[in-house]
């Protein structure tokens, strides 16, 4: 497990009229990545952002842009997001017929390659490509909408994911996304996660800048 905690605020929960201001605030607060949720209205019941937003973010922050594709046929979007400035490209194994091929294409485009697993998706979907991953994302809610409650049972899945990565000697980061906040981050960190996507907890707080550091501090709370 990496000793380095990454906090990745999700722009899904920003006030888009104040996007640049809010991203700058969390950058000052010590955010490590900026997380961008891309949804197509088919794989998940919501429609959000595309490469144009990533290009806009690239102009206002130097932080790595962590792009999570919740779309069908993610291979269509690898090059466009790389060209827009994404640093991390994560997709779901159910959305493409050739997971290994797409991971190779992501890396060929200069991005870190990630695979995301929904709450009901078995870890076995990632097992055969562990050696090709830079990041494994465990969804701790059913994806589609912000401000959902963390599913407590997923903590055990995160622990099993960490064990799988360790058994294979993988250096991939273990990311969690969904319902991450002051009351949940410590338990999931102790289960083995090292990278935390937080949207509402940060951007809907009274002070997003200081909330980033508070979440990092809470990782070390004993639960």
Image (cartoon, rainbow, N blue to C red):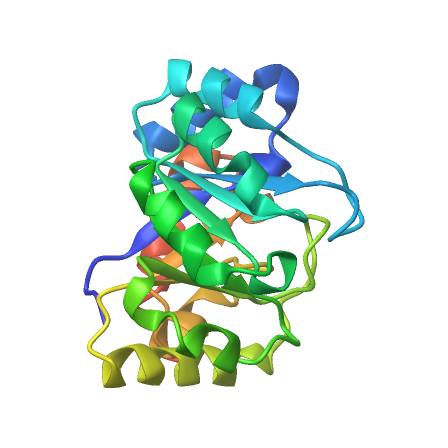
Quarter that holds the C terminus: bottom left
Please tell me which residue lies in front, 205 or 22: 22
Identity of the residue drawn at 19% across and 77% down: 169
Please tell me which residue lies in front, 166 or 79: 79
Quarter that holds the N terminus: bottom left
In percent of width and height, residue 87 lies at: 35, 37
In percent of width and height, residue 201 lies at: 56, 48
Q: Judge left or right: residue 108 versus residue 169.
A: right
Q: Is residue 84 above or below residue 192?
A: above
Please tell me which residue lies in front, 119 or 7: 119
Q: Judge left or right: residue 112 versus residue 72.
A: left
Q: Judge left or right: residue 16 versus residue 171.
A: right
| Image quadrant where residue 63 sits | top left
| Image quadrant where residue 97 sits | bottom right
> Number of callouts in the render?
0
| Image quadrant where residue 160 sits | bottom left
Q: Is residue 1 above or below residue 144?
A: below
Identity of the residue drawn at 37% across and 62% down: 218
Please tell me which residue lies in front, 58 or 113: 113
Q: Is residue 101 above or below residue 30?
A: below
- Residue 199 visible in the shown view: no
- Residue 26 visible in the shown view: yes
In percent of width and height, residue 93 lies at: 56, 63
In percent of width and height, residue 162 lies at: 34, 78
Identity of the residue drawn at 34% across and 75% down: 192
């Amino acid at each position: 497990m990496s000793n380095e905690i990454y906090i990745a605020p999700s722009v899904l929960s920003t006030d888009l009229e104040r996007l640049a201001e809010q991203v700058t605030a969390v950058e000052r607060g010590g955010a490590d990545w900026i997380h961008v949720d891309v949804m197509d209205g088919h794989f998940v019941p919501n429609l959000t952002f595309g490469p144009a937003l990533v290009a806009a973010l690239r102009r206002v922050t130097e932080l790595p842009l962590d792009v999570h594709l919740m779309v069908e046929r993610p291979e269509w979007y690898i090059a466009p997001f790389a060209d827009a400035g994404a640093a991390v490209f994560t997709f779901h194994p159910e959305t493409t017929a050739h997971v290994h091929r797409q991971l190779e294409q992501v890396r060929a485009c200069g991005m870190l390659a990630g695979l995301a697993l929904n709450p009901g998706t078995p870890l076995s979907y990632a097992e055969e490509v562990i050696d090709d991953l830079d990041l494994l994302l465990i969804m701790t809610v059913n994806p589609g909408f912000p401000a959902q409650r963390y599913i407590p049972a997923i903590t055990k899945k995160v622990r099993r994911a960490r064990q799988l990565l360790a058994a294979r000697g993988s250096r991939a980061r273990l990311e969690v996304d969904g319902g991450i906040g002051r009351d949940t981050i410590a338990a999931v960190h102790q289960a083995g996660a090292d990278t935390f996507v937080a949207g509402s907890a940060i951007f809907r707080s009274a002070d997003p800048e200081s909330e980033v550091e508070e979440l990092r501090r809470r990782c070390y709370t004993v639960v």
